[in-house]
Image: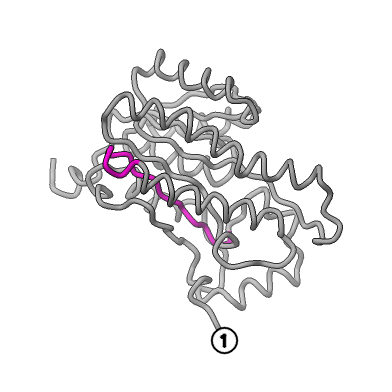
Amino acid sequence: MNYLDSLFDLKGKVAVIIGGTGELCGHMANGLAQAGVEVVLAGRDASKADAKLDAISEAGGKGYFVATDLSKKDSLESLLEQVVVKSGRIDILINGAGVNSPTPFLEITDEELENIMSINFGATVQACQVFGRYFLEQGAPASIINLGSISGLNPLSRVFTYSASKAAVHNLSKNLAREWADKDIRVNTLVPGFFPAEQNRKVLDESRVLEILRNTPMSRFGNPDELIGAVLLLASCKAGSFITGTEMIVDGGFDAMSI
């Protein structure tokens, strides 16, 4: 094995990807699988997982689906138990489930606020509790990657509840990174810019797209595969061994743009 391969060696590792049936996390799962990771897609819709698992298998990777209700802690605990029984270990957790809404601020209902905060932030908290406890008990190096958002760093119009929920995820990740750093559990936030994800489509009209492109130095949306390199770095306990508490931005320069 050459130096570069050893630095990013993930063979034999197991990753649980919550939200792995979605567009962005599905590509992350495929990238991890091609790097030798056994990937577990956790979500509600088995039919969405089938296409992702077929692509993983065709690329020579290994993976399977576990039906999970992210809103219930006992379902997350069952997910962990099933993976440990079937795969024998867990090394990587990715929290990527998310929902969005374009509701104007003064029209946001209590129900919408509760729903988005529950899925985007509450489910991430619960997953970090469930899997964090397991990682602490195992005493082995582990990586938690929470999916944030560029709107969690800088406010964006039209996505008030989403932005607030993702800002909370960013803060959670930094706190857990501090809490568990000496236990060799690294916690980082992966921060995508604008990608063709499901939750973006409901807030993107032609004028919005043009505005985004004007403020993105690369003048385009990201390709989901362009997140894979960052995921491999954060997941690797060798290449990413001293990276924790960071917000890794993958946005084509959007965050660097001013006037």
- The residue where tag 1 is placed is 259
Q: Going by the image, does 142 lie left or right of 64?
A: left
Does residue 245 lie above or below 26 as drawn? below
Q: Going by the image, does 238 lie left or right of 126?
A: left
Residue lying at the far bottom in this picture: please name it. 259
Dividing the picture into quarters, in which one does residue 52 lie? Answer: top right
Q: Is residue 233 magenta?
A: no
Residue at x-position 71% and y-position 59%:
159
Q: Going by the image, does 218 lie left or right of 185?
A: right
Circle 1 Cα neighbour tier, 10 Å, few/some/many (<14 / 14–19 / ≥20): few
Q: Amino acid at mark 1?
A: Ile
Residue at x-position 59% and y-position 53%:
166
Q: Quadrant of the N terminus?
A: top left
Residue lying at the far left in this picture: please name it. 2
Q: Is residue 190 magenta?
A: yes
Q: State the count of labels.
A: 1
Colour scheme of the picture: one colour
Q: Nearer the viewer, residue 144 or 113?
A: 113
Q: Secondary structure beneath disc 1?
A: loop
Q: Position of residue 205 (x, y in %)?
A: 76, 64
Which segment did they paint magenta?
180-194
Q: Position of residue 253 (x, y in %)?
A: 48, 72
Residue at x-position 48% and y-position 28%:
130
Q: Position of residue 259 (x, y in %)?
A: 57, 86
Does residue 3 lie above or below 35 as drawn? below
Does residue 96 lie above or below 160 as drawn? above
Residue at x-position 34% and y-position 51%:
244
Q: Position of residue 233 (x, y in %)?
A: 32, 50
Q: Going by the image, does 143 lie left or right of 201?
A: left
